[in-house]
Image (spheres, rainbow, N blue to C red):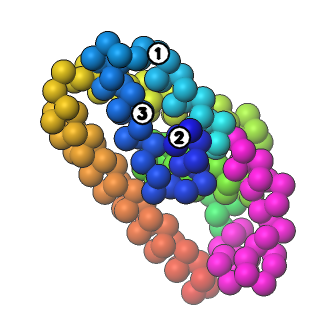
Amino acid sequence: MLALVENVFPPLPADTAVALGAFLSGRGVLDARTVFGIGWAANVGGATAVYWLGRRYGREFFKGRVGKKLLPEPVLAHIAAQYHRHGTYGIFLSRLLPVWRAVVPPFAGIAGLSPARTLIPLAVASALWYAALTFLVATLGANFDDVLHVLDRMNQVLMALAVATVVLAAIAIRRLLRR
Protein backbone atom coordinates (compact mmCIF):
# COMPACT_ATOMS: atom_id res chain seq x y z
CA MET A 1 0.00 0.00 0.00
CA LEU A 2 2.82 2.42 0.84
CA ALA A 3 4.37 1.75 -2.59
CA LEU A 4 1.12 2.96 -4.16
CA VAL A 5 0.75 6.08 -1.99
CA GLU A 6 4.43 6.96 -2.54
CA ASN A 7 3.45 8.14 -6.04
CA VAL A 8 1.24 10.83 -4.50
CA PHE A 9 3.26 11.64 -1.36
CA PRO A 10 6.96 10.94 -2.11
CA PRO A 11 8.33 11.16 1.47
CA LEU A 12 6.32 8.06 2.38
CA PRO A 13 8.74 5.23 3.21
CA ALA A 14 7.56 2.65 0.65
CA ASP A 15 11.08 1.24 0.28
CA THR A 16 11.24 0.75 4.04
CA ALA A 17 7.98 -1.22 4.00
CA VAL A 18 9.22 -3.43 1.15
CA ALA A 19 12.57 -3.83 2.93
CA LEU A 20 10.79 -4.93 6.10
CA GLY A 21 8.77 -7.48 4.12
CA ALA A 22 11.95 -8.69 2.43
CA PHE A 23 13.71 -8.90 5.79
CA LEU A 24 10.86 -11.03 7.10
CA SER A 25 11.09 -13.20 3.98
CA GLY A 26 14.80 -13.69 4.70
CA ARG A 27 13.77 -14.95 8.14
CA GLY A 28 11.23 -17.35 6.61
CA VAL A 29 8.13 -15.45 7.78
CA LEU A 30 7.01 -14.17 4.35
CA ASP A 31 7.56 -15.21 0.76
CA ALA A 32 10.03 -12.93 -1.10
CA ARG A 33 8.14 -13.28 -4.39
CA THR A 34 4.95 -12.10 -2.72
CA VAL A 35 6.73 -9.15 -1.10
CA PHE A 36 8.20 -8.18 -4.48
CA GLY A 37 4.90 -8.70 -6.32
CA ILE A 38 2.79 -6.65 -3.94
CA GLY A 39 5.35 -3.82 -3.72
CA TRP A 40 5.86 -3.71 -7.49
CA ALA A 41 2.16 -3.96 -8.39
CA ALA A 42 1.19 -1.25 -5.90
CA ASN A 43 3.97 1.05 -7.09
CA VAL A 44 3.17 0.61 -10.77
CA GLY A 45 -0.56 0.90 -10.07
CA GLY A 46 -0.11 4.19 -8.23
CA ALA A 47 2.24 5.54 -10.90
CA THR A 48 -0.22 4.56 -13.61
CA ALA A 49 -3.04 6.37 -11.81
CA VAL A 50 -1.09 9.63 -11.45
CA TYR A 51 0.08 9.34 -15.08
CA TRP A 52 -3.55 9.18 -16.25
CA LEU A 53 -4.55 12.02 -13.91
CA GLY A 54 -1.70 14.15 -15.26
CA ARG A 55 -2.65 13.27 -18.83
CA ARG A 56 -6.32 14.08 -18.25
CA TYR A 57 -6.19 17.12 -15.94
CA GLY A 58 -2.59 18.33 -15.78
CA ARG A 59 -2.48 20.70 -18.76
CA GLU A 60 -5.70 22.37 -17.67
CA PHE A 61 -4.41 22.80 -14.13
CA PHE A 62 -1.25 24.56 -15.35
CA LYS A 63 -3.32 26.87 -17.55
CA GLY A 64 -5.14 28.11 -14.44
CA ARG A 65 -4.06 30.92 -12.12
CA VAL A 66 -2.28 28.74 -9.55
CA GLY A 67 -0.78 26.45 -12.16
CA LYS A 68 0.72 29.35 -14.12
CA LYS A 69 2.46 30.55 -10.97
CA LEU A 70 3.86 27.10 -10.22
CA LEU A 71 5.05 26.42 -13.76
CA PRO A 72 4.85 29.16 -16.36
CA GLU A 73 4.02 28.04 -19.91
CA PRO A 74 7.63 28.30 -21.21
CA VAL A 75 8.84 26.02 -18.40
CA LEU A 76 6.01 23.58 -18.99
CA ALA A 77 6.79 23.58 -22.73
CA HIS A 78 10.47 22.92 -21.96
CA ILE A 79 9.58 20.03 -19.64
CA ALA A 80 7.29 18.55 -22.30
CA ALA A 81 10.02 18.87 -24.95
CA GLN A 82 12.50 17.09 -22.69
CA TYR A 83 10.02 14.30 -22.00
CA HIS A 84 9.52 13.84 -25.74
CA ARG A 85 13.26 13.92 -26.34
CA HIS A 86 14.37 11.66 -23.47
CA GLY A 87 11.07 9.98 -22.57
CA THR A 88 11.71 6.26 -22.45
CA TYR A 89 15.20 6.14 -20.98
CA GLY A 90 14.62 9.29 -18.91
CA ILE A 91 11.59 7.72 -17.30
CA PHE A 92 13.48 4.48 -16.74
CA LEU A 93 16.43 6.19 -15.04
CA SER A 94 14.29 8.60 -13.03
CA ARG A 95 12.20 5.78 -11.60
CA LEU A 96 15.35 4.46 -9.94
CA LEU A 97 15.84 7.67 -7.91
CA PRO A 98 14.05 8.20 -4.60
CA VAL A 99 11.61 11.13 -4.41
CA TRP A 100 12.23 11.95 -8.09
CA ARG A 101 10.37 8.80 -9.13
CA ALA A 102 7.07 10.24 -7.93
CA VAL A 103 7.36 13.30 -10.20
CA VAL A 104 7.94 11.34 -13.39
CA PRO A 105 4.51 9.78 -14.13
CA PRO A 106 2.28 12.86 -13.79
CA PHE A 107 4.60 15.02 -15.89
CA ALA A 108 4.84 12.30 -18.52
CA GLY A 109 1.05 12.47 -18.67
CA ILE A 110 1.06 16.26 -18.80
CA ALA A 111 3.67 16.13 -21.59
CA GLY A 112 1.35 13.83 -23.53
CA LEU A 113 3.70 10.84 -23.74
CA SER A 114 1.95 7.71 -24.90
CA PRO A 115 1.02 5.08 -22.32
CA ALA A 116 3.46 2.57 -23.85
CA ARG A 117 6.35 5.04 -23.89
CA THR A 118 5.65 5.91 -20.25
CA LEU A 119 4.33 2.82 -18.52
CA ILE A 120 6.65 0.17 -19.97
CA PRO A 121 9.95 1.77 -18.83
CA LEU A 122 8.24 2.76 -15.59
CA ALA A 123 7.16 -0.83 -14.89
CA VAL A 124 10.55 -2.29 -15.89
CA ALA A 125 12.49 0.17 -13.70
CA SER A 126 10.14 -0.45 -10.77
CA ALA A 127 10.54 -4.20 -11.25
CA LEU A 128 14.33 -3.90 -11.21
CA TRP A 129 14.26 -1.64 -8.17
CA TYR A 130 11.92 -3.79 -6.09
CA ALA A 131 13.58 -7.03 -7.20
CA ALA A 132 17.00 -5.70 -6.19
CA LEU A 133 15.68 -4.31 -2.92
CA THR A 134 13.81 -7.52 -2.08
CA PHE A 135 16.74 -9.76 -3.02
CA LEU A 136 19.31 -7.66 -1.19
CA VAL A 137 17.35 -7.33 2.01
CA ALA A 138 16.12 -10.94 2.02
CA THR A 139 19.72 -12.08 1.53
CA LEU A 140 20.91 -9.84 4.34
CA GLY A 141 17.86 -10.73 6.40
CA ALA A 142 19.87 -12.51 9.05
CA ASN A 143 21.38 -9.22 10.23
CA PHE A 144 19.08 -6.22 10.42
CA ASP A 145 21.93 -3.78 11.16
CA ASP A 146 23.60 -4.73 7.87
CA VAL A 147 20.29 -4.22 6.08
CA LEU A 148 19.88 -0.74 7.53
CA HIS A 149 23.48 0.15 6.67
CA VAL A 150 23.14 -0.99 3.05
CA LEU A 151 19.78 0.77 2.61
CA ASP A 152 21.14 3.95 4.17
CA ARG A 153 24.17 3.94 1.87
CA MET A 154 22.03 3.17 -1.20
CA ASN A 155 19.58 5.94 -0.37
CA GLN A 156 22.43 8.42 0.19
CA VAL A 157 23.86 7.68 -3.25
CA LEU A 158 20.46 7.84 -4.92
CA MET A 159 19.57 11.03 -3.04
CA ALA A 160 22.83 12.65 -4.21
CA LEU A 161 21.93 11.70 -7.79
CA ALA A 162 18.42 13.10 -7.32
CA VAL A 163 19.74 16.38 -5.87
CA ALA A 164 22.22 16.72 -8.74
CA THR A 165 19.41 16.12 -11.23
CA VAL A 166 17.18 18.73 -9.54
CA VAL A 167 20.02 21.28 -9.51
CA LEU A 168 20.73 20.69 -13.20
CA ALA A 169 17.02 20.98 -13.98
CA ALA A 170 16.77 24.22 -11.98
CA ILE A 171 19.73 25.66 -13.87
CA ALA A 172 18.16 24.68 -17.19
CA ILE A 173 14.81 26.19 -16.20
CA ARG A 174 16.48 29.38 -15.00
CA ARG A 175 18.32 29.71 -18.31
CA LEU A 176 15.09 29.08 -20.17
CA LEU A 177 13.28 31.80 -18.21
CA ARG A 178 16.05 34.32 -18.93
CA ARG A 179 15.46 34.01 -22.70
Which residue is depicted at the point 34% across and 55% down?
Answer: 159
* Horizontal relation, residue 63 to residue 38: left or right: right
Q: In the image, which residues are magenta? A: 48-77
Does residue 78 show up?
A: yes
CB of mark 2 within 8 Å of CB of mark 3?
yes
Question: In the image, what residue type sits under mark 2?
Answer: Ala
Q: Residues within 10 Å of mark 1 (few under 14, many from 20)?
A: some
Question: What amino acid type is highlighted by mark number 1?
Answer: Arg
Residue 34: x and y in percent read 50, 18
Decide: few, some or many residues near mark 3? Use Cα within 10 Å; few <14, some 14-19, many ≥20. many
Sequence order check, earlier mark of 2 and 3: 2
Whether residue 100 can be seen here: no
Element assignment for label 1: helix
Are the residues at dot 2 and dot 1 in contact (C-beta closer than 8 Å)? no
Q: Left or right: 177 with respect to 48? A: left
Q: Which residue is mark 3?
A: 18
User: Mark 2 packing: few (<14 Cα in 10 Å), some, or many (20+)?
Assistant: many
Going from N to C along the chain, the mark reached first, 2 or 1, is 2
Label drawn at residue 3 = 2
C-alpha distance separating marks 2 and 3: 8 Å
Residue 91, placed above or below residue 159:
above
**Which amino acid, mark 3?**
Val
Give the SS element for disc 2: helix
- Classified by dominant secondary structure, the portion drawn in magenta counts as helix
Separation of residues labelled 2 and 1 (CA atoms): 16 Å
Marks 1 and 3, how far apart at CA = 11 Å
Q: Is residue 174 left or right of residue 77?
A: left
Q: Position of residue 108 (x, y in %)?
A: 68, 51
Query: Which of the numbered marks, if any, corresponds to residue 7?
Result: none
From the viewer's perspective, is residue 66 above or below residue 37?
A: below
